[in-house]
Image: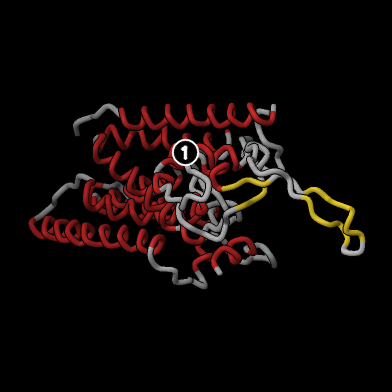
Amino acid sequence: MKQYQPYFMYIMTCLQLLMMLISIYKYYLVTGNFVAPLNENIMLGPDSGALIQLGARFLPCMKKTNYTLMECPPSIKGSINPVAFPLDENRSGTLLTNPSYCSLADICSFGLKKDETPNQWFRFVTPIFLHGGIFHLVFNLAFQIRTGFQMEKDFGTWRIMIIYLASGIFGFAFGASYSGISSSVGCSGSLYGLLACLLLDLIQSWKLIIEPWKELIKMLTVVFFSLGIGLIPYIDNFAHVGGFITGILTGLIFMPTIIFSKRDLKIKRILMIISIFITTFIFIWVFRQFYVTSSECKWCHYINCLPIKKGWCKNYEASTN
């Protein structure tokens, strides 16, 4: 097979490293600290405010919601003065001052003006370049450098670029309607798309693999274990599941295949055509679900979190209902 230079993976990795440094520096400029306290961010990085201002997926910045005013994160200086209100109805002269509050214009940035309806659609794309902290970045880049670079060398830059970006974008769009005021960043959805392509390549090249069942069991173990970790709170498993689904579909369209017979060629061509229609449909569906319909899904939060103990999934249930 022809070997390609992994230019796309070089660029993505460098940009992700750069954005990590920028997010830490941005947090430092306001707070005087390089990373947020561990009780705010266990990933050793900035708080959510710095990431939102750099382009994290954040529902109130992407469409009109009921969230128009919120308490400022430590990394954002609000433009709204602290609010004073009576401490006790019987002592109306005693006042207590609230923490400073931020408008959407303060939090979302990117030129959003006060009282303007938010429509920052690019937040489906920009989170791919951001990470919650150093640990988050290292976990993702470990797979990206070890596996993604080799996949681009084997399969070509344009194929991997399309699969990587499509998986990442759909992953963030898939769970956007159920995210509430939780922000989300990372290239995990894109990496799950690549993982799906590895599984697809194993199945399509079955006849050439030594002990294919053994390899399939190993691959499925990795997939189920990885998706299982995503059920832990504060991990966006919607992005993982959405990225994996898109990786399978776009892999059927763009990944090179070995043809073993005329029947095999016909099957793979039919699967390619079906995948084109399904991919088009799910992208239209997910954005229509986000922007047009307001139907509720009572069980969708279980994709992100399983109620293993009482209160475990409270945040996700609140954002779904």
SS at circle 1: loop
Q: Nearer the viewer, residue 266 or 216?
A: 266
Rendered residue at 59%/26% (across/down): 25
The color scheme shown is: secondary structure
Residue shown at 80%/48% (left/top)?
A: 97
Residue 222 visible (yes or no):
no
In-image side of 318 versus 203 (left or right):
right
Question: On the image, which quarter does residue 203 sit in?
Answer: bottom left
Say few, some or many: other residues with alpha carbon within 10 Å of mark 1 (under 14 / 14 to 19 / 20 or more): few
Residue 26 in the image: x percent, y percent?
58, 29
Nearest to the observer: residue 249 or residue 291: 291
Q: Quadrant of residue 10?
A: top left
Percent across and percent down for residue 67 are 57, 56
Q: In this rendering, is residue 193 above or below 46?
A: below
| Above or below: residue 209 compared with residue 232 | above
Q: Position of residue 302 (x, y in %)?
A: 53, 66
Q: Residue furthest right?
A: 91
Residue type of the residue flagged with mark 1? Phe
Task: Between residue 292 and residue 133, name the one nearer to us.
Answer: 292
Residue 75 image position (x, y, % from top left) = 64, 36
Left/right of residue 315 with respect to residue 223 in the rendered view: right
In the rendered view, does 35 fall on the left or right side of 146?
Answer: right
Give the tally of numbered discs. Answer: 1
Decide: is 60 above or below 23.
below
The residue that appears at 61% across and 55% down in the rendered structure is 233
Of 66 and 12, which appears nearest the observer?
A: 66
**Which residue is painted at 74% across and 49% down in the image?**
83
Q: Which residue is mark 1?
A: 110
Residue that sits furthest to the left in the current view: 262
Q: Quadrant of the C terminus?
A: bottom right
From this viewpoint, which residue is outermost toward the front? Answer: 93
Q: Is residue 250 visible?
A: yes
